[in-house]
Image (cartoon, rainbow, N blue to C red):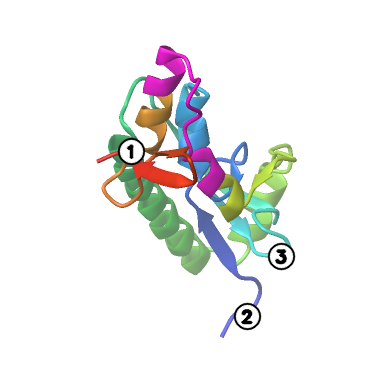
Amino acid sequence: KVNKAAINFHPGPPEYRGTGCVNYALYENSKFYGCTAHLINEKVDNGKIIGVKKFNINKNSISEVLTKTYETMSGLAISTIKNIKKNPDFVEKQILKNKIIKWTNKIKKLKDSNNFYQINKNIKKNDFLNKIRATDTPKFKPYIKLYEKKFILE
């Protein structure tokens, strides 16, 4: 029932395309995170950008950042839908307004995210703690592989 275009509400800013975005943002000690509303096209997280909402992440845990992301993304979805109902030209106007915002060339796939959760056994302490901060959630856990066995952080 899409009349003009399909919109995706991506749980990450344009700097982080694909899957596992929040993990990479935290690991890279990004100061900001957020979400992006964009038109869906044939490529992943590539369509014209309708809007971006960002927030500070400082030293927040992954759970805190995910909660804030979902709250921000819900707000962006609600305001976008309300604005489309008020003004049928809203999407086109927002795309023009945001045309200077570009997606990064880097795109993370599920395979990349799965590999990112693996901790190198020679990792330095600060990198180890940062990796834990960026990957330890109730559903997904970082792990170490030794002698073809996988040891998952509990």
* Viewer-nearest residue: 111 or 82: 111
Query: In the visual, does 106 lie left or right of 134?
Result: right
Distance (Cα) linking label 3 and label 2: 15 Å
Q: Which residues are magenta?
A: 114-129
The amino acid beneath tag 1 is Asp
Residue 110 visible? yes
What residue is rendered at 66% in x and 74% in y? Answer: 4
The amino acid beneath tag 2 is Asn
x and y, in percent, of residue 6 in the image? 60, 70
Q: Is residue 131 above or below residue 35?
A: above
Pair 3/2: label in front: 3
- Which residue is under mark 1? 136
Label drawn at residue 3: 2
- Assess whether residue 122 is covered by the magenta stretch: yes
The amino acid beneath tag 3 is Asn
Disc 1 residue crowd, few under 14, some 14–19, many 20+, Cα 10 Å: some
Distance (Cα) linking label 1 and label 2: 41 Å
Pair 1/2: label in front: 1
